[in-house]
Amino acid sequence: MSYKTDRTASELQKCISLILQNKLRNPDVSPLTTITEVTVSKDLKYATVYVSAILESEKTVKALNASAGFIRHELSVALRNMRTVPNLVFKTDSSVEYGRKIDSILRGLSNSESDS
């Protein structure tokens, strides 16, 4: 990615996190939701927002996609210096679950080595 897309993605991540904490009043969004990563297309028209939610992650992602218009509007207010605010697509971030799986496998290996 280029410097501009990285900087834009970082700023979007911060602003979306603040919007979720302070302005979004959707009961289907888990209060334990974290924005783990944002990727932005080269033309800055589309952004994929990866979400990690402790409780009901699929329900949370559906609710966030339903609220994408509101979140985009709030981003346009917060980021007045951007010419256009990208269209948002929310997806579940499975890297946390994948990391837990790898960790449990490594613990199993270390336990079997210590038993030998």
Image (spheres, helix red, strand yellow):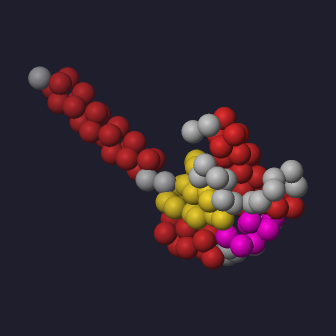
Whether residue 21 is visible here, answered yes or no, is: no
Task: Residue at the far left: name it.
Answer: 116
Pick the front one: 43 or 23: 43
Q: Which residue is drawn at 67% across and 53% down?
A: 44
The quarter holding residue 74 reads: bottom right
Q: Position of residue 68 (x, y in %)?
A: 67, 70
The quarter holding residue 102 reads: top left
Region rendered in magenta: 68-74
Classify the position of the C terminus by image quarter.
Answer: top left
Q: In the image, is 95 to the left or to the right of 1?
A: left
Question: Quick check: 91 above or below 112?
Answer: below
Q: In the image, is 29 to the left or to the right of 115?
A: right
The stretch drawn in magenta includes residue 69: yes
Question: Quick check: 106 above or below 60?
Answer: above
Q: In the image, is 58 to the left or to the right of 83?
A: left
Task: Residue at the far front: name it.
Answer: 43
Question: Quick check: 115 above or below 48?
Answer: above
Whether residue 78 is visible here, answered yes or no, is: yes
Q: Which residue is drawn at 49% across and 54% down?
A: 93
Q: Residue at x 64, y 64 (%)?
A: 88
Pick the front one: 37 or 57: 37
Q: Where is residue 54 in the image (x, y as percent from the top left)?
A: 53, 58
Q: Which residue is drawn at 52% across and 61% down?
A: 91
Pick the front one: 83 or 55: 83
Q: Position of residue 79 (x, y in %)?
A: 83, 54
Q: Position of residue 84 (x, y in %)?
A: 77, 60
The stretch drawn in magenta includes residue 64: no
Q: In the image, is 60 to the left or to the right of 22?
A: left
Magenta span: chief secondary structure: helix
